[in-house]
Image: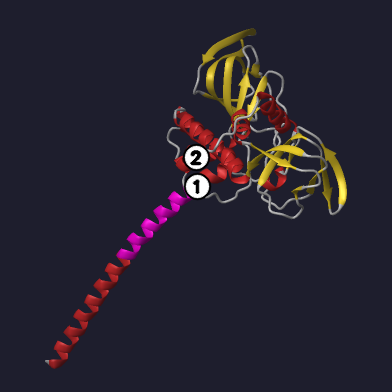
Amino acid sequence: MNTINGTMGTIQELQSLLFKKNERIQHLEISLLKKENEIQQLKSQLDKFQSVMPFGINSLPLGQAGRRKHRAQGISAEPQSLRTIQEIVQQKFQEHPKPETSKELIRRAIADNDFMKNLETTQIKEIVDCMFPVEYSCESLIIKEGDVGSIVYVTEEGNVEVSKEGKILCTMSKGKVIGELAILYDCTRTATVKALTDCKLWAIERQVFQTIMMRSGLIRQAEYTDFLKSVPTFKNLSEETLIKITDVLEETFYNQGDYIIRQGARGDTFYIISKGKVKVTKKRTERGRHRTVHKDVAARRLFRREGVARRRCENCKYHCRRS
């Protein structure tokens, strides 16, 4: 009898232990599910930041006659002190008043710089407004090779000398951007810049510059994502997928009467009409006779280069993706 009671007690203990273990497993599974959801949310946030912060600024090829392209510009993927997208978008920086001649000088300097010439108009305007005046006396060091770069300059008055490892590379006068490489590519100063005369320059700090770059990318991404959600073809795609698509969209402009696609051409691009209207024509042969079919296509419709039709524009703007 004692043996039976002992056996029953052991079974009950094992069942109780098994029940507790099952409860523990269920608790861990719930915890794991929560962690997986958190990871997905963080990945989504990471995708948003990465999509507007590719490494370096890529030079864009000149568009063909009659069309203009705008693509997101990249900056170094440096961690920002601003914690959320909303904070980045809403962040305000002090604007420094300057005469129109100085504004135009800065704009021209940026346009002439190989690494900054593809910035968007809104980005350039913010940079111009946020630049503040600095002055250096003759023989002063403006930039020292090997230092950590924190400021980009545009020269307005005076001459500067650029040297590397003690060897003079060139001299520059007004209307030149200096110190941009360390800001764009997150590296130390690649050369030394010394004032040959008393100099006046316009300057912008690293965090201000990079936030302007990133903010415009985030705003553009939000606009493109909302636009894609309104396109029937993409309306059921996940947020993460839409973000990845927005990262490779190129905004292309066509004037009225321009041909976007010609029948018989090789197809490597699809277009989404953002604004305007296009006319689709297709030549067909029926019973030995040639016949042209016409069809109008309006905004938020997607079409591909299928090599079978040509589409003519009426004041159109497109988001396109090259295959």
Q: Which of the pair 193/42 is nearer the observer?
A: 193
Q: Quadrant of residue 153?
A: top right
Label 1, secondary structure: give it. Answer: loop
Q: Which of the pair 182/256 is nearer the observer?
A: 182
Residue 82 as seen in the image, left or right of residue 61: left
Disc 1 packing (10 Å; few <14; some 14–19; many ≥20): few
Residue 261, above or below 213: above
Q: Amino acid at mark 2?
A: Gln
Q: State the separation of the CA atoms marked 1 and 2.
A: 9 Å
x and y percent of residue 107 in the render? 69, 29
Residue 138, above or below 123: below
Q: Amino acid at mark 1?
A: Leu
Mark 1 and mark 2 lie on one chain; the one further toward the N terminus is: 1
x and y percent of residue 151 in the render? 66, 45
Residue 58 as seen in the image, left or right of residue 20: right
Residue that lies at the very extreme toward the bottom in this rendered image = 2
Q: Which residues are magenta?
A: 27-46
Residue 284, above or below 58: above
Find disc 2 in the rendering and name its residue: 91
Say the numbered circle drawn on residue 82: 1
How many numbered discs? 2
| Display colour scheme | secondary structure
Q: Quadrant of residue 136?
A: top right
